[in-house]
Amino acid sequence: MKKLKIAFLSYRSKPFSGGQGIYVKYLSKALLDLGHEVDVFSGPPYPDLSASIKLIKIPSLGLYEKESKFFDVQLNSLTDPINLFEWLSINSGGFPEPYTFGKRLKKVLSNDIDKYDIVHDNQSLCYELLDFQKQKPLVTTIHHPISKDLNYQLQSTNDIFLKLLMRRWHSFLTMQKFVAKKLNKILVPSKSSIVDIREEFGVKENKMERLMNGIDQDVFYPDLKVRKISRRIVTVASADVPLKGLDFLLQALFELIKIYPDISLSIIGEEKKGGHTERLIDELNLKEHVNFFSNLNQENLRKTYCEAEIAVIPSLYEGFGFAAIEAMACGVPIISSSGGALPEVIKDCGIIIPPKDSKAIYNSVTELFSSPDNAKKLANKALERVKERFSWEVVAKKLEEVYFTEIENFHNAND
């Protein structure tokens, strides 16, 4: 079978965490292991890649990683129209990175696109994809429609000014919806996302194909060297992101303390100082019971999962749910909401509850704490499911088939 040269595009690829960074890191390595050559074109933060994969950096101003989005910029860089647009957009509440990534990418990739057999976009959905699609076979991964995030954020507040800011930040959705409808091939990680992309972006279902994600089972596994901490719960949630449903877990924790005074919650994610979540923790007097863990290396990430007795994923919506699979791979019994693709991913290997239901979280936690045999049974079943279904090697082999099909379709259409 022919070995391919693949251009893999990702407008930001935060290493070690975040769905897009995980996807780029492991999928590019799995394709490399099949014998293909992969060049990753990425904006910052840049991905953590295998040494054999070439990273072609598409620099942005990187203002989201700086203290001041307004002042932390060199004035001479603003003579570039793309930089000026990015700076103005960010400082007026927008998120221009998918758009500006496309503009910068075109300058870099256009002259070299003939070197590649196929182009694979990781949800930038920039306008330039429509030009690339005319020149080369192209597939795009959409993890889930970001409009779902916006909808949940709008529901989380009655403040009209905040609603306007949220809509402003998500203004890139106009571009993404326009581009998505014109793409020939879209990969999604779940059947749930296929439905959501059809409804939110107006994409025809026959253009989409499910390709579930994998997990690095050399990183996530039941580490017997890690001591379990009694009554420890673990979750993954960026503070102040309503979509992750952290409020409902904290409300359940407030009630659980009354019967389990030693209960504690590890939150894998960044704490926003002075934000909504911090205020809620103070209001519920939970500070001694809650700890945030961010920027963890792989060993400490595994440790944080493995020392917990239960994992709770209270998300209102997930296009896939990497956190659920990570917990399952570490042998931790899982309680999950039914938001988005989570039931499709977990199946009968955990306790599934409705989103936005702190009482259901409370009842499920007490059920597992009071029945360690059932908790162990669920954990073992979940671990077996991960081993059977969620391997990056399996994902890459299926993706390889998609690539060859799209290459053939492209050549047939252009003969």
Image (cartoon, grey):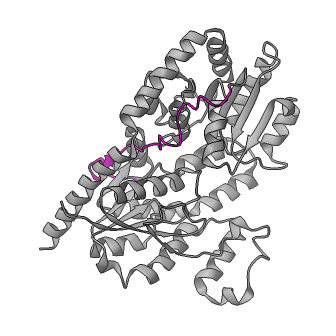
User: Which residue is found at the position 50% from the left and 33% from the top?
Assistant: 329
Considering depth in this image, is 246 or 108 the residue closer to the camera?
Answer: 108
Give the answer, above or below, for where 228 lies relative to 241: above
Provide the major secondary structure of the magenta segment. Answer: loop
| Image quadrant containing the C terminus | bottom left
| Image quadrant containing the N terminus | bottom left
Give the answer, above or below, for where 98 lies relative to 218: below
**Image quadrant assignment for residue 308:** top right
Residue 395 screen position, x and y as percent: 35, 47
- Magenta region includes residue 203: yes
Give the answer, above or below, for where 137 lies relative to 262: below
Q: Answer yes or no: is residue 245 visible.
A: no
User: Would residue 231 appear left or right of 41 to someone viewing this image?
Assistant: right
User: Would residue 149 appear left or right of 26 to someone viewing this image?
Assistant: right
User: Which residue is found at the position 54% from the left and 27% from the top?
Assistant: 331
Residue 64 screen position, x and y as percent: 69, 65
Q: Answer yes or no: is residue 211 visible.
A: yes
All told, the count of numbered labels is 0
User: Which residue is found at the position 80% from the left and 77% from the top?
Assistant: 71
- Magenta region includes residue 186: no
Residue 179 screen position, x and y as percent: 40, 64
Q: Residue furthest front?
A: 225
Residue 414 screen position, x and y as percent: 16, 73
User: Would residue 105 appear left or right of 117 to someone viewing this image?
Assistant: right
Considering depth in this image, is 140 or 45 the residue closer to the camera?
Answer: 45
Give the answer, above or below, for where 89 lies relative to 36: below
Considering depth in this image, is 10 or 400 the residue closer to the camera?
Answer: 400
Q: Which residues are magenta?
A: 202-227
